[in-house]
Image: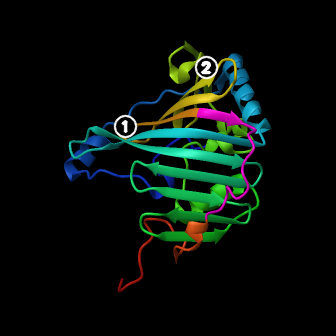
Amino acid sequence: MSHRWSSALLGGLCLLAAVSAHAQQSQASQVPVVLLPETPQLEPKAIDILKAMSARLAAAHTMTFTALTTYESPARTGQPLAYTTLSEVTLERPDKLRVITPGDGPRSEFYYDGKTMTAYSPESGHVAIAAAPPTIDAMLAAAYKDAAIYFSFSDVIVADPYKDIADGLKLAFVVGQSRVVGGTTTDIVVVANGTVQVEIWIGAEDKLPRMARATYFNEPGSFRHVVELSNWHLDPTIPAGSFASAEAAKAIHIDFASPDEKLPDGN
C-alpha cells in the first residue's frame, strides 16, 4: 500500500502552520505505540471488498469525481488545525488526467495529455510544463519526484488500485457498515502496513470509495488525513480538449521543480 491516501503534499498546495520549538519537542514524544501482527492477518471479506472496488475503478475507461481533502497540521499550540482542498477530477485511461483545484488556497490546474504534464496557477499567471511518461501511473510518480506534485486520491486513479493497497499489507479487516457516509450504505474496511493505517468507506452496492481516513505511525500527534469522494461518473463522454488549457499555454513559463528546492545563490 502506498502513501498516496495522505494529503500532506497535494501538489505543493499545503498551507502549513508555524510550530514553535517547544511544540515540536512535545509533539516528538507523542508518537503512538503501533501494534501490528508479525505475520499478515488479512480477513478474506475485507480483501474481497477491496478487490471489488479495484475492479470497478480499473474497468472504467473514463471517470469524473470530486475529492474533498482535509488534513491536519500542528498549530503554534501543538494542537491540530484542519485545512481543506477541493479538486474536480477528470480521467481518461491510460494517459489523460485533469485536476482543477479551486480552493481552499490559490486555484490550481493540472493537465496531463500522455506527452506532457502542466501545472498552472491562474492567480499568479505562471505555468510549468514538462515531458511526461506515457501512462497515468508513471506520470504520477514523475510528478512527485520532479515537483512534489501529489494527489490524495492517487490510489483511486492508478491502473490497479488493489495492487497499490496490497503492497506490504499486514492487516485488513471489516469494521462494519455505515449508512451515513456518502449518502449510501458503505462497507468500512481498515488496512495497515508498516507505515500507515487507512480506514476506507466503500459503497456496498456500487463498490465505489466514498471516504478514506489515514493516520501515519511515525507522525507525531497522529494527525488525520481524510479524502471524501463524491459525484462519481464512470465512463462518461469526455469533451475534446479537456486535457489542455489555452490560458495555461499563454502564462509565464517556469521550471518544474520541488517547492522546497533552494534557489541559486544571489536570488
Q: Mark 2 to mark 1: distance in Å?
A: 24 Å
Quadrant of the frame with the C terminus:
bottom left
Percent coordinates x, y for residue 44 in the rendering: 71, 18
Q: Which residue is mark 1?
A: 31
The three-letter code of the residue at mark 1 reads Val
The residue at which mark 2 appears reads as: 173
- SS for dot 2: strand
* Colour pattern of the rendering: rainbow
Disc 2 residue type (three-letter): Phe
Q: Is residue 206 left or right of residue 22?
A: right
Percent coordinates x, y for residue 133 in the rendering:
73, 63
Q: Residue at x 64, y 55 (%)?
A: 140
Q: Is residue 94 in view? A: yes
Q: Where residue 148 appears, x then y in whole percent?
A: 52, 59
Q: How many marks?
A: 2
Q: Is residue 99 above or below residue 148?
A: above
Looking at the image, residue 11 sits to the left or right of residue 28; the answer is right
Q: Does 18 appear in magenta?
A: no
Magenta stretch: helix, strand or loop mostly: loop
**Which stretch is magenta?**
231-245
Residue 65 placement: quadrant? top right
Q: Looking at the picture, tell me which residue is in the foreground, 56 or 37.
A: 56
- Please tell me which of labels 2 and 1 falls first in the chain: 1
The quadrant holding residue 80 is top left
Residue at 50% from the left image edge and 42% from the top image edge:
6
Q: Is residue 195 visible?
A: no
The image's mark for residue 163 is: none
Identify the image quadrant of residue 1.
Answer: top right
Q: Secondary structure at mark 1?
A: loop
Question: Does residue 232 belong to the magenta stretch?
Answer: yes
